[in-house]
Image: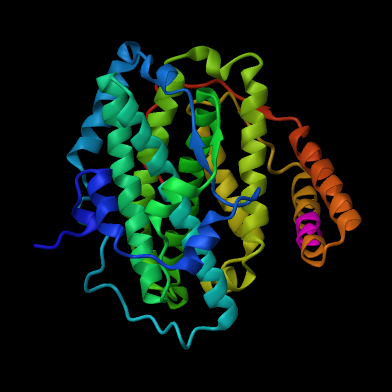
Amino acid sequence: MNIHSADATTAEEALSIQEKFDSETATAVAMQDTLLTPRFYTTNFDELDAINVEHIRDEWDPLIAQMVSDPNKGHFKKNADWDQVDWDGMDPALRKEFIDFLISSCTAEFSGCVLYKEMKRRGSNHEITQLFQLMARDEARHAGFINDALREAGVAVNLGFLTQKKKYTYFRPKFIYYATYLSEKIGYARYITIFRHLEKHPEHRFHPIFKWFQEWCNDEFSHGEAFALLMKTDPKLTRGHNVWWIKFFLTAVYATMYVRDHQRPAFHQALGVDTDWYAHEVFTKTSELSKQIFPITLDIDHPKWVPTLRKLQAANVDLANAEKSGAKFAALGARLRAAKAFATLFFIPAKRHNVPSQTRLEPCY
């Protein structure tokens, strides 16, 4: 009997189902390695394996129990709610941007799966390996589901090829915590904002995959909770000089999202969403959620915030055009402008707050 990746109980099982499908075009896009494309990470797994969760047991055990209960098993597959998609009749610009969105999302989900699965393979600490196996399971299902959607358009990402061939970036564990925590939380904020918008405006739901976004983002939310608790095991990670690292990752994640989303005007127009409005909504949600563990939030209402993001976006457009035409000096100038804009964003004073004693949250949007 055939099994779908949505019903798989482990990441390995889900990925083995996907191995029979691939598309050279989609895989080539997923293989790209730029500042805006999802990366694959590796880290010091021995340091992760040494984590002790005893003093956060009251919050850890309920989270693990929730994930073990597997509320989304069987959810991420097509059913009667999956409408027929007219890929051939889709506006070419929208088709291109939407496929790019799906490939980027698939690569990002699979990136998490690869990292989490490797920790499960290398570790001996049952608490930590169990968590990472559960998260890898979820991310494998998400990646498989996106590949199902891509396959209808005649493309699919060869996930096994990515595992072997895509470049890996080494991050220290604390940087993995900051980056992945924010990735999971901003992923929740992005998906739930689109889901709630399309609940009110179903006429803009141009593809059925958006109907699955609520359960999808709830998985992202749980993974963010897990990384918040991992940071809580070592209070030094959110104090002292590490607050500067937190600010750096907050700025980098927000800026990257803003620039990447502004590369997809047809996609957001089809959704009926103003890209600047969407960015502010997502930043606001992510900032509120991250107060659970981070002692600062970025001042996204500062008068320099949006104008500087626009300068960063303009520099990115000029850089892409210069690289395409081989104009080296123009490319250098665009890079310098982008660096200046990022530095301006980074040095906008942050907002400080007291971190609550209880870290765990539940999806609230």
| Residue 254, picture quadrant | top right
Residue 113's x, y, as percent? 38, 43
Q: Nearer the viewer, residue 79 or 18?
A: 18
Asked whether residue 289 appears in the rendered view, the answer is no
| Image coords of residue 64 (percent x, y) | 25, 30
Horizontal arrangement in the rendering, residue 53 relative to residue 243 (left or right): left
Closer to us: 127 or 218: 127
Residue 256 visible to an observer of this rendering: yes
Q: Is residue 353 above or below residue 346?
A: above
> If the image is split into quadrants, where does the N terminus sit?
bottom left
> As displayed, is residue 194 above or below residue 174?
below
- Magenta residues, dominant SS class: helix
Please indicate whether residue 130 sits to the left or right of residue 45 in the image. Answer: left
User: Which residue is found at the position 25% from the left and 37% from the top?
Assistant: 67
Name the residue rendered at 53%, 55% in the picture. 31
Where residue 329 sits: x, y (%)? 91, 54
Asked if residue 107 lies left or right of residue 241, the reply is: left
Q: Which segment is the magenta one?
A: 314-320
